[in-house]
Amino acid sequence: MSHEFSLPTRPLGRTGWNATVITLGGVKWDTQVPEDEAIAIIRRAFELGINSVDTAHGYGGGQSEARLGIALQGWRDRVFLSTKTSQRSYDDAMREMELSLQRLKVDHVDLMVVHSLDNEEEYRQIMARPSVLDAMEKLRSEGHIRHIGVSGHWVKHVLQRIITEYPFDAVVCPIGAFNVAYNYTFHDTVIATARERGMAILGMKVYGAGRVKHAKSVEPYLRYSLHQPVDTLIVGADSIAQIEETVRIAASNPPPLSDDELASILPEAVAITQEFGDGEFRWTSHYLEPGAADS
Ligand SMILES: NC(=O)c1ccc[n+]([C@@H]2O[C@H](COP(=O)([O-])OP(=O)(O)OC[C@H]3O[C@@H](n4cnc5c(N)ncnc54)[C@H](OP(=O)(O)O)[C@@H]3O)[C@@H](O)[C@H]2O)c1
């Protein structure tokens, strides 16, 4: 199929899939727009050439998977499909993952992710076998899961430790300029280790979980992340215009930010994450207190 934009692709670790540099994220259109609009956003992303989509069991209380399940009709074979479970025990994870397959109306997902590993206690629960990992391995042996991954937002050393101890196929972690602004990047730990081990790396928080709407332009934020050592950027959107803008910029193969350009957006990145309006997602608040992210 030819598309109006030509999005670059990169090998997604050892999965065998060449993913477009943009992966459609599964939040925002799960709750902020009606179902028909959500389906239109997802389908527009696919028409624009995006061939990878990321959701999770918990997004929108199930609405993200359910809406995606409808939008995927006719597109399933052309898209790398990733979802996640937040459960840590074998039985709970098995129940949740089976429901995810039903909601998505698929017999398999390409990637199943252990969702949001962000503290030592969760690390212990996940590694205390039998656990979610055994449930994932069972579904993988039955063909319902192709690859197993893990995600985390806040505590890079825990995420790094788990990827050295279990042979995950993929890791999902922040890769935005906002992390540079808060001096909490995953480059030297999680990303370096994942690369060494041939894992797929899916970056998120490119737009600071939406804080970018208070910035002068989204463009430098996307340009920063496009040139980081990850395979694809998971980017959220709550309108067709937003995903079109992201694809237009990514497809134009923009150059890396110079050091001066990066330095010039960091004060803005901090400023627009200091105050939150009603209902605004406080993702960066974890980084407001020095060291808080590691505790
Ligand atoms: N693995 C995990 O544990 C985990 C956790 C969170 C998210 N994720 C994944 O990552 C995806 C992205 O989430 P994220 O938190 O990293 O968010 P993000 O991609 O940094 O930000 C997405 C938000 O940025 C705003 N935006 C997008 N395009 C825009 C444009 N052209 N102009 C102005 N604003 C624009 C929108 O905010 P508004 O909707 O507010 O307008 C959009 O919802 C999620 O959808 C999900 O799939 C994974």
Image (cartoon, rainbow, N blue to C red):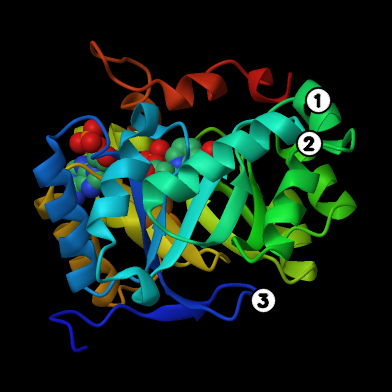
Residue 105 - label: none
Q: Amino acid at mark 1?
A: Glu
Residue 291, located in which quarter of the rendered image?
top right
Total labels drawn: 3
* Dot 3: element: loop
- Compared with 213, 188 (above or below) is below
Looking at the image, tell me whether mark 2 or mark 3 is earlier in sequence order.
3
Q: Amino acid at mark 3?
A: Arg
* Dot 2: element: helix
Which residue has dot 3 on it? 14
**Looking at the rendering, in which quadrant would you find the N terminus?**
bottom left
* Dot 1: element: helix
- The percent position of residue 178, horizontal first and vertical second, equals 45, 39
Which residue has dot 2 on it? 158
Between residues 68 and 150, which one lies in front from this camera angle? 68
Between residues 234 and 105, which one lies in front from this camera angle? 105
Which residue has dot 1 on it? 120
Q: Residues within 10 Å of mark 2 (few under 14, many from 20)?
A: some
- Compared with 150, 78 (above or below) is below
Looking at the image, tell me whether mark 1 or mark 2 is earlier in sequence order.
1
- The percent position of residue 288, horizontal first and vertical second, equals 52, 19
Query: Pointer 1 and pointer 2: residues touching (CB < 8 Å)?
Result: yes
Residue 258, located in which quarter of the rendered image?
bottom left
Q: Residues within 10 Å of mark 3 (few under 14, many from 20)?
A: some
Q: CA distance from mark 2 to mark 3?
A: 23 Å
